[in-house]
């Protein structure tokens, strides 16, 4: 937790290059997701005199630069630039919704087509994301992709991730493209425990999500592709409805059904070092002396979504944790 002289999470904020007094910020929520829809920054700012809207020109298209993290605790201090999507005034409070500027560039339809023939995913990422540092797994398959004029780069990157059974997301100046099977095997960044007051990292609230069927149902298909040399190739149970895909590679057909299933919704004391895509180990302690550990919950899970929330003197972190389907 931050020491005296530092804020808990939001350290500083500039709007259109002008420093905003930190004390005017009522609350801040910073959201990362393991998908190409974030980071997002939500702010509630007190504006009794109208100075923020009138003089600082807070409106759609304005740019926010923030320093986030805990310089005294987990040493997870970082800077990020956001594009304001909306900033309505309600009574004396301005509610700002903004998206990472780097992420926004991936959502803008391209004016220049790109053609990738037998290209590595890392090369595709480097070409489409000039402002982000790529972090990718060493994929063993090449692919052919077209980004036509008027299409969004994020759409193509999502397709690359889907074909390789992976996740694609941006956070803290990086664009990640990782396979779910490899990601779940990495060393956990933190171990969080429930019902253990002696634990270093404790879960304060926990909820089972129980959405396995709803998440996997759209993937229940027999995926079929056509190869010029080997004819039709398929993956999936024969009784499932057929879904045609353009790539007949068996690895791609198998990956079409992969999805990250959310398992737990947990809250804990603020920890800015937790990022989307990180692996968290969860230990749930029972009150049963003969069966102390709940083994029905997967031990290691991927952070599908994380929200860092600060309000005045309170700072908490909320995570949605999930595992890949088998």
Image: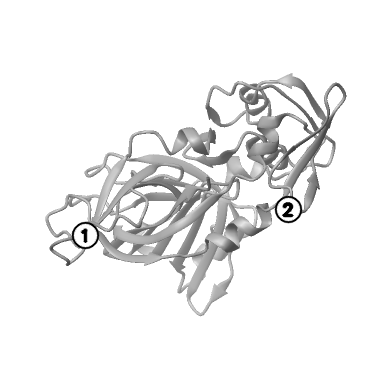
Nearer to the camera, 160 or 44 = 160
Q: Name the residue: 47% across, 65% down.
A: 210
Element class at badge 1: loop
Local packing at callout 1 (Cα closer than 10 Å; few below 14, some 14-19, many 20+) is: some
- In percent of width and height, residue 163 lies at 67, 36
Q: Is residue 172 visible?
A: yes
Residue at the front extreme? 238
Nearer to the camera, 11 or 218 = 218
Q: Is residue 63 visible?
A: no
Q: Name the residue: 70% across, 37% down.
A: 253
| Residue 298 disc label | none
Task: Please state if 110 lies on the left or on the right of 291 as rendered.
Answer: right
Mark 1, residue position: 285
> Relative to residue 95, is residue 305 depicted above or below?
above
Front disc: 2 or 1: 2
- In percent of width and height, residue 232 lies at 83, 33
> Relative to residue 78, is residue 50 depicted above or below?
below
Which of disc 1 and disc 2 is earlier in sequence?
A: 2
Task: Please state if 297 lies on the left or on the right of 128 as rendered.
Answer: left
Element class at badge 2: loop
Total labels drawn:
2
Q: Name the residue: 45% across, 74% down.
A: 48
| Residue 240 disc label | 2
Q: Name the residue: 69% across, 21% down.
A: 142
Give the CA separation, mark 2 to mark 1: 40 Å
Residue at the bottom extreme? 91
- In percent of width and height, residue 295 lies at 30, 55
Local packing at callout 2 (Cα closer than 10 Å; few below 14, some 14-19, many 20+) is: few
Nearer to the camera, 278 or 109 = 278
> Relative to residue 2, is residue 183 depicted above or below?
above
Look at the image and name its color scheme: one colour
């Amino acid at each position: 937790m931050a020491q005296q002289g530092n804020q808990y999470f939001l350290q500083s904020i500039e709007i259109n290059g002008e420093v905003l007094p930190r004390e005017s910020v009522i609350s801040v929520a910073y959201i990362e997701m393991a998908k190409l829809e974030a980071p997002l920054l939500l702010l509630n700012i007190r504006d009794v005199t109208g100075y923020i809207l009138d003089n600082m020109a807070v409106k759609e298209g304005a740019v926010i630069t923030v320093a986030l993290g805990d310089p005294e605790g987990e040493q997870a201090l970082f800077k990020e630039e956001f594009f304001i999507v909306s900033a309505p005034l309600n009574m004396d409070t301005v509610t700002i919704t903004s998206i990472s500027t780097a992420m926004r560039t991936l959502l803008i339809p391209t004016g220049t087509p790109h053609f990738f023939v037998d290209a590595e995913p890392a090369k595709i990422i480097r070409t489409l994301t000039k402002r982000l540092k790529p972090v990718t797994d060493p994929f063993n398959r090449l692919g052919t992709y077209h980004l036509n004029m008027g299409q969004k780069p994020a759409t193509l990157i999502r397709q690359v991730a889907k074909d390789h059974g992976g996740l694609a997301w941006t956070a803290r100046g990086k664009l990640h493209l990782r396979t779910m099977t490899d990601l779940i095997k990495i060393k956990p960044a933190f171990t969080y425990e429930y019902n253990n007051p002696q634990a270093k990292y404790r879960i304060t609230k926990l909820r089972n999500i129980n959405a396995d069927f709803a998440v996997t149902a759209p993937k229940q298909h027999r995926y079929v592709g056509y190869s010029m040399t080997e004819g039709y190739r398929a993956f999936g149970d024969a009784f499932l409805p057929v879904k045609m895909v353009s790539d007949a590679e068996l690895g791609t057909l198998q990956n079409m059904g992969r999805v990250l299933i959310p398992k737990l919704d947990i809250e804990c004391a603020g920890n800015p070092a937790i990022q989307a895509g990180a692996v968290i180990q969860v230990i749930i302690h029972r009150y049963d002396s003969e069966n102390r550990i709940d083994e029905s919950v997967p031990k290691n899970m991927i952070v599908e979504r994380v929200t860092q929330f600060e309000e005045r003197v309170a700072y908490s972190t909320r995570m949605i944790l999930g595992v890949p389907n088998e």
